[in-house]
Image (spheres, rainbow, N blue to C red):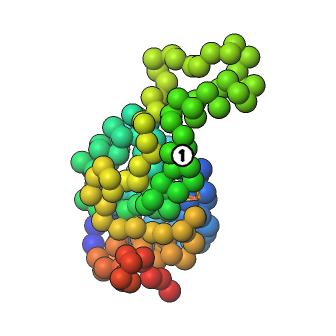
Amino acid sequence: MSKKKIATIWLAGCSGCHMSLLDMDERLLEVAKLADIVKSPVVDGKELPKVDVAIVEGAVASDEHLEELKHIRRQAKILVALGDCAITGNVSGIRNRVTKEQALERAYLDSGVNLDGVLPTHPVLQKLEDRVRPLHEEVPVDYYIQGCPPSADKIFYVISEILHGREPTTEGDGEVKYG
Ligand code: SF4
């Protein structure tokens, strides 16, 4: 069986889901027998080639996230939403309680971290979307791994089942069961 290609990508999240992924510890070696991780915050690949599985942490909060997510969907046969920010918005979505202008003012003006007293406007900076959104509001998602963060056991179970060509089992609410 030829090795599959995996990517793990981090949009608007705290990296906690990727920390949990790394907590698979020695089971990462089992994954490595079945697949090459070709792009990830934990490897050096910069471009996203065509992959069998893309595992995405975090929500869509900016124009760059949206563009990247659409690219991921074009490149990946299977897209997995990793963690509650990717699935519901969760912590990243807390800013939906206020307008993006209010969020920017709070972060850059009221907090006192910006001594110039102006909002950052450089053209290379990402632009916030009006509303933080989960992945499935923008592209079709194939599997959801719930949790904040999901446990390493749950992440390993889903990745392992997919790489072996099996279907991870689900309950009525769509939560992937594991173990
Ligand atoms: S689901 Fe929790 S751990 Fe994962 S990115 Fe969001 S806040 Fe962080």
| Residue 36 seen anywhere in this rendered image of the structure | no
Quarter where residue 64 is shown: top left
Q: Extreme top residue here? A: 116
Q: Residue at x 58, y 64 (%)?
A: 149
Give coordinates of residue 13: x percent, y percent.
Answer: 54, 50
> 55 or 65, which lies in front?
65
SS at circle 1:
helix
Looking at the figure, which quarter contains the N terminus? Answer: bottom left
Task: Give the quadrant of residue 78.
Answer: bottom left
Residue ID for mark 1: 97
> What amino acid type is highlighted by mark number 1?
Arg
The residue at 30%/65% (across/down) is 142
In this view, 96 is above or below 76: above
Residue 168 visible (yes or no) = yes
Q: Residue 76 location, x and y as percent? A: 28, 54
Location of ligand 1 given as a quarter of the image: bottom right
Q: Is mark 1 within 8 Å of ligand 1?
A: no
Residue 40 location (% of width, % of height): 47, 49
Residue, x 27% and y 58% (percent of image)?
A: 140
Residue at the extreme bottom: 179
User: What residue is drawn where x is 56% and y is 49%?
Assistant: 94
In front of the other: 55 or 27: 55
Front residue of this view, candidates 178 and 115: 115
Question: Is 70 left or right of 17, judged from the image as shown?
Answer: left
- Residue situated in front as seen by the camera: 57 or 1: 57
